[in-house]
């Protein structure tokens, strides 16, 4: 079974969706480590409740991003992590980190990439006035929110949507799409060809 590490900074609702999927036996993988860069992240509470190994790693204890990332990589290697899942991890991972887990880092983003990259995907889409937005699960590379896309699904934006109402639908979709993408990943059904992710469908 593949060992997953889940990196979070905040509420951890995607972490919870992944935990639930593993518990139900839908996602056959082992959540070997939950790591947060924020001491008060609710994700840590969720990990504790689920009986998972969790750790708070403070970036303040390190002089720069690279030394923090070196520490993270060391921790992940000790836990024999196969895949690193970013789930609301509010940091840009360094090239050093990416090189150590090449095509093994996955992220979820609350827009239809390449539109509305960055930390405000939902609000930016709403303010732009798009009629359709959505969710993307993608591999992480050196470009911000720019790696090969694994799965995407769309959501219609309503005229009376606010950031709150739209967020509810985006998050609901995220909680479905992330475990779905991970299922394909751990089953070895994803191949990256240039920018494209080819999905092997089960017969
Ligand atoms: C999600 O919207 C995700 O797409 C983005 O950060 C948010 C994390 O939410 N990268 P949560 O902590 O999983 O609830």
Image (cartoon, grey):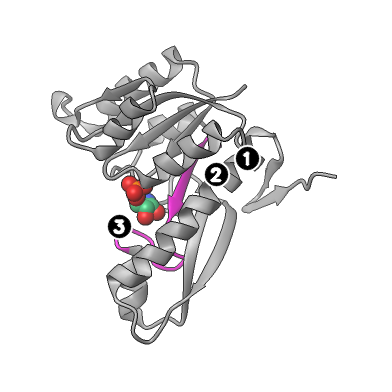
Q: Is mark 3 within 8 Å of ligand 1?
A: yes
* Range drawn in magenta: 103-120
Q: Identify the main secondary structure in magenta.
A: loop
Pinpoint residue 12: horizontal percent, then vertical percent. Answer: 33, 42
Pinpoint residue 103: horizontal percent, then vertical percent. Answer: 56, 37
Cβ atoms under marks 3 and 1 closer than 8 Å: no
Residue at 36% of width from left, 17% of height from top? 75
Q: Nearer the viewer, mark 3 or mark 1?
A: 1
The crowding category of the residue bearing disc 1, from other C-alpha atoms within 10 Å (few below 14, some 14 to 19, many at least 20), is some
The crowding category of the residue bearing disc 2, from other C-alpha atoms within 10 Å (few below 14, some 14 to 19, many at least 20), is many
Residue at 60% of width from left, 47% of height from top? 180
Quickly name the residue at label 1.
183
Q: Is residue 6 above or below residue 106?
A: above
**Does the magenta run of residues contain 108?**
yes
Q: For the residue labelled by badge 3, is the local secondary structure a helix, a strand or a loop?
A: loop
Separation of disc 2 and disc 3 at Cα?
A: 21 Å
Looking at this rendering, what residue extends furthest in the top direction?
78
Quickly name the residue at label 2.
179
Cβ atoms under marks 2 and 1 closer than 8 Å: yes
């Amino acid at each position: 079974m593949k060992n997953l590490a889940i990196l979070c900074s905040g509420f951890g609702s995607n972490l919870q969706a992944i935990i639930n999927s593993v518990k139900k036996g839908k996602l056959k993988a082992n959540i070997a480590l939950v790591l947060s860069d924020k001491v008060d992240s609710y994700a840590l509470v969720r990990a504790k409740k689920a009986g998972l190994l969790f750790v708070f790693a403070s970036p303040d204890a390190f002089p720069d991003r690279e030394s923090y990332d070196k520490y993270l990589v060391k921790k992940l290697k000790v836990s024999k992590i196969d895949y690193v899942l970013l789930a609301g991890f509010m940091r840009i991972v360094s090239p050093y980190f990416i090189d150590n887990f090449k095509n093994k880092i996955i992220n979820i983003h609350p827009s239809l990439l390449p539109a509305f990259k960055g930390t405000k995907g939902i609000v930016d889409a709403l303010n732009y006035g798009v009629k359709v937005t959505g969710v993307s699960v993608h591999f992480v590379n050196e470009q911000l929110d720019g790696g090969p896309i694994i799965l995407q699904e769309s959501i219609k934006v309503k005229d009376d949507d606010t950031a709150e109402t739209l967020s509810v639908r985006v998050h609901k979709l995220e909680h479905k799409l992330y475990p779905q993408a991970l299922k394909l990943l751990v089953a070895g059904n994803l191949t990256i060809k240039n920018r494209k992710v080819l999905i092997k469908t089960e017969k």
